[in-house]
Image: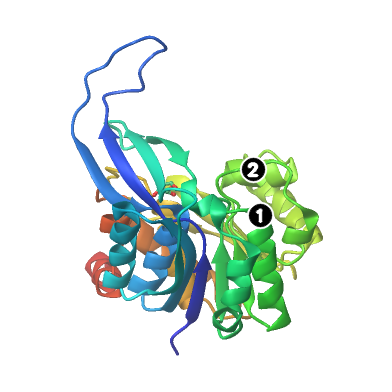
Amino acid sequence: MTNRVTVIGSLNVDTILEIPRLPKPGETLAMGDQSFAGGGKGSNQGIAAGRAGADTHFIGKIGDDANGKFMVKSMTDSGINVDQVTVTKEAKTGQAFILLDKNGQNSILVYGGANQVLSTKDVDNAKDIIANSDFIITQFETPLAVAEAAFKVAKDNNVVTILNPAPAQEAIPASLLAVSDLVVPNETECQTLTGVEITDEASMIKGAEKLHAMGAKGVIITVGSKGAFYHTADGNYGFVDAFKVNAVDTTAAGDTFIGALSSQLKPDLSNLAEAIRFANRASSITVQRMGAHPSIPTLAEIDAAEKAAK
Ligand code: RIB
């Protein structure tokens, strides 16, 4: 059965600047190529879910500009329903400036723009879409009040909520975590949320248990190129290794993981390890290609990579 996934979150046009290394303060540095791509944590997760086969709706906000049109086209080209992507005249479409070094590591500056104009009214307008989903996903590039309002609608309608607490943010309301069924931080984000430094399995269990105490039924801690740790409230846990590949650009790897995961997950979270393996395969493809939207794989590509590895 096809999962119905709604993503509420950010849409950014990414400007990718290829640099040899980060410049020092006051230094002028020659850079390599410059390119543009669709991005934003929310839209990357939406594209990843849709390309991996989920019936995907997106709720977000763009400016009345060419970048906004570019983002809508990128989403619709991947079959994402954008009926709830609305236009504001109050701000420009979100942007991100990605400094990508020759090892594939990135540093990102984000202009929130229209993403920060998204409001609880937009959630009200999208109530039916949320209520008819199996999963709803959000992140922290749109206002926290919007995330909480959307998750409350979801919980009232037995829709499973997935929180990606990224980028890391201090002072997250307990009321948001209380309505988050599955929380998917990386190590840094987990530490910010729980105060537990993630160094080994024992610390991951401790971090996960703290998140369970805050309301999460499931926790997945992503650990970059190593893989992902999962832990459920009933004490089931494990680590799913990542696939070893040569990364050229890690942008959107975490977003691909979450979107692809949501396309396969069962609402009772009973197939977490299997869905994580699929998500690891998807993000292993993303890191081998440049840019956010252009690098996110389709289901056919994920299946082909899986077959090729056998
Ligand atoms: O997670 C990657 C994304 O973060 C980029 O696409 C960029 O837009 C920033 O929001």
Residue positioned 53% across, 69% down in the render: 273
| Secondary element at tag 1 | helix
Q: Is residue 231 left or right of residue 275?
A: right
Q: Amino acid at mark 2?
A: Gln
Q: Is residue 163 left or right of residue 112?
A: right
Compare residues 224 and 143 and report the one nearer the observer. 143
Q: Is mark 1 within 8 Å of ligand 1?
A: no
Query: Mark 1 and mark 2 in contact (Cβ < 8 Å)?
Result: yes
Badge 2: how crowded within 10 Å, few (<14), some, or many (20+)?
few
Residue positioned 29% across, 54% down in the render: 66
Mark 2 vs mark 1: in front: 1
Residue positioned 58% across, 68% down in the render: 122
Quarter holding the N terminus is bottom left
| Secondary element at tag 2 | loop
- Say above or below: 74 vs 108: below
Quarter holding the C terminus is bottom left
Q: Amino acid at mark 1?
A: Leu
Q: Is residue 299 among what the camera can see?
A: yes
Q: Earlier in the sequence, mark 2 or mark 1?
A: 1
Whole-percent x and y of residue 225? 42, 47
Q: Which residue is mark 1?
A: 144
Q: Residue furthest left?
A: 33
Whole-percent x and y of residue 97? 37, 37
Residue positioned 31% across, 38% down in the render: 104
Compare residues 251 and 238 and report the one nearer the observer. 251
Compare residues 7 and 243 and report the one nearer the observer. 7
Query: In this figure, what is the number of numbered marks?
Result: 2
Q: Which residue is mark 2?
A: 169
How far is the residue under mark 2 from the one under mark 1?
10 Å
